């Protein structure tokens, strides 16, 4: 189980202390702000559409927040709430049709849209940190963990079309586990393309004061070199795809004398209850790697590590053993342990919600750009939902449902909490 992300939850808890009496007054400006930002996107439609690009993006974004998942639902939502959207959008030509919404979302550049959305939410989160948290809380105590993994949108594939088989949309993402925000996405053809996508994705990131973690598939020379070039640290899982490296590390820790030597160098053991069972976790990291074959091909490698999870399943004792290479020193055991636990942060805090909370796999859109842009806007919605979750104390899925059922009362209340200038005034007066 990954360590639960805390930042958005902490901010949400702090916001509960702020009482907002006029949500419309401070919620609408947030919508206007984001609408203005969306105008920066390149409009590749040229003159073929009279519908403003920002209208379509905002309608899709708000509809996704309000529990809509498919194009027809998004369109009907826009029609029902036309008067509300007219408060911040120019609806001279009415609500765009289903076809216009779908076609427009298919020509927007996903990289442009993601950069815009990530900048918007990170600025909001950082501003909230400065407003709500004390200097001590706001201080960076440890390196942030960036978790990388791919996800397939299963609903986007088809076996038989006029053009033959259509492969599903695959997205490889870089997820900041500590901030609970997806930083960058690389859309790829197949799961195995993650190997080449990793270094390309990393090029766009600032990895200063971070630790990158990923599954064994992405433990590749080029990926680790790319991390080093971006001034980041790494904790890389090792399995059979790097056979010789795996066998070397396994043999080292299988040797009782060497295992004890490594334990004496840097060792941690903890017990916790998870999924109604008791688990024992052991972490060992050693900088004794002179024996490691071809170690120079792994950029900045300084240590190897082992993580052991022991638990009981169906009456049987289970021992799960994982091996790692890293550029952390053996003295940095605490950060090694944190990185190992956070490897699954992207799966538990991002991918699971895209499927469960947003029903991403149920959307049957085959056009890759449209599916990609929906993925990006879902992630922005997810960040907002996590931020306001403590205000509701309910699951994100249920919060979406509540927004859809009681839209006029809920949406502006939610958006009010990211109008930082107004929150400052309210916080100072209370």
Image: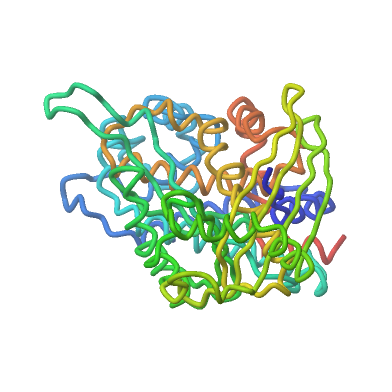
Where residue 254 sits in the image (x, y, percent)?
Answer: 64, 54
Q: Residue furthest left?
A: 162
Which residue occupies the foreground of this view, 83 or 364? 364
User: Which residue is painted at 52% across and 60% down in the image?
Assistant: 248
Which residue occupies the foreground of this view, 217 or 188? 217
Residue 141's quadrant in the figure? Answer: bottom right
Give the position of the N terminus as an image quadrant. Answer: top right
Which residue occupies the foreground of this view, 139 or 208? 208
Q: Is residue 266 left or right of residue 242?
A: right
Q: Is residue 188 left or right of residue 290?
A: left
Q: Is residue 154 left or right of residue 354?
A: left
In this orientation, does residue 192 appear? yes
User: Which residue is painted at 57% across and 55% down in the image?
Assistant: 250
In this orientation, does residue 418 appear? no
User: Which residue is painted at 51% across and 77% down in the image?
Assistant: 300
Q: How many marks?
A: 0
Where residue 333 sits in the image (x, y, percent)?
Answer: 73, 67
- In the displayed structure, 278 sits above or below 40; it is above
Where residue 296 sits in the image (x, y, percent)?
Answer: 44, 76
Give the position of the C terminus as an image quadrant. Answer: bottom right
- In the displayed structure, 121 sits above or below 158; it is below
Where residue 242 sits in the image (x, y, percent)?
Answer: 43, 55
Residue 278's quadrant in the figure? Answer: top right
């Amino acid at each position: 189980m990954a360590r639960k992300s805390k930042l958005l939850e902490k901010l949400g808890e702090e916001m509960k202390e702020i009482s907002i009496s006029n949500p419309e007054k401070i919620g609408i400006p947030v919508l206007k702000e984001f609408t203005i930002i969306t105008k920066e996107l390149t409009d590749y439609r040229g003159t073929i559409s009279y519908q403003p690009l920002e209208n379509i993006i905002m309608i899709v974004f708000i509809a996704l927040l309000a529990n809509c998942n498919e194009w027809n639902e998004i369109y009907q939502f826009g029609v029902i709430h036309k008067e509300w959207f007219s408060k911040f959008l120019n609806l001279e030509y009415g609500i765009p049709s289903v076809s216009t919404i779908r076609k427009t979302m298919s020509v927007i550049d996903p990289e442009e849209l993601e950069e815009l959305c990530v900048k918007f939410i990170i600025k909001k989160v950082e501003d909230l940190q400065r407003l709500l948290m004390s200097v001590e809380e706001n201080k960076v105590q440890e390196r942030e963990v960036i978790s990388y993994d791919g996800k397939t949108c299963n609903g986007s594939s088809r076996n038989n079309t006029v053009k033959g088989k259509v492969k599903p949309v695959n997205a490889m993402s870089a997820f900041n586990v500590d901030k609970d925000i997806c930083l960058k996405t690389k859309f790829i053809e197949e799961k195995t393309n993650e190997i080449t996508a990793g270094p390309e994705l990393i090029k766009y990131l600032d990895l200063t004061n971070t630790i990158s973690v990923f599954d064994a598939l992405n433990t590749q020379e080029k990926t680790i070199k790319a991390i080093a070039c971006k001034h980041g640290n790494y904790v890389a899982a090792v399995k059979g795809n790097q056979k010789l490296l795996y066998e070397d590390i396994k043999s080292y820790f299988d040797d009782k004398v060497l295992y004890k030597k490594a334990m004496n160098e840097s060792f941690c053991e903890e017990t916790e209850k998870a999924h109604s069972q008791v688990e024992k976790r052991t972490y060992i990291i050693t900088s004794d790697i002179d024996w490691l074959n071809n170690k120079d091909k792994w950029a900045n490698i300084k240590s190897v590590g082992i993580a052991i999870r022991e638990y009981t399943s169906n009456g049987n004792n289970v021992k799960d053993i994982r091996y790692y290479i890293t550029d952390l020193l053996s003295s940095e055991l605490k950060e090694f342990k944190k990185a190992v636990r956070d490897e699954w942060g992207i799966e538990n805090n991002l991918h699971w919600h895209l499927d469960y909370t947003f029903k991403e796999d149920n959307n049957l859109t085959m056009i890759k750009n449209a599916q990609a842009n929906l993925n990006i806007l879902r992630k922005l919605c997810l960040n907002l939902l996590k931020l306001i979750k403590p205000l509701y104390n309910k699951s994100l899925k249920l919060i979406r449902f509540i927004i859809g059922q009681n839209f006029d009362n809920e949406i502006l209340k939610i958006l009010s909490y990211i109008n930082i200038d107004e929150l400052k005034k309210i916080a100072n007066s209370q």
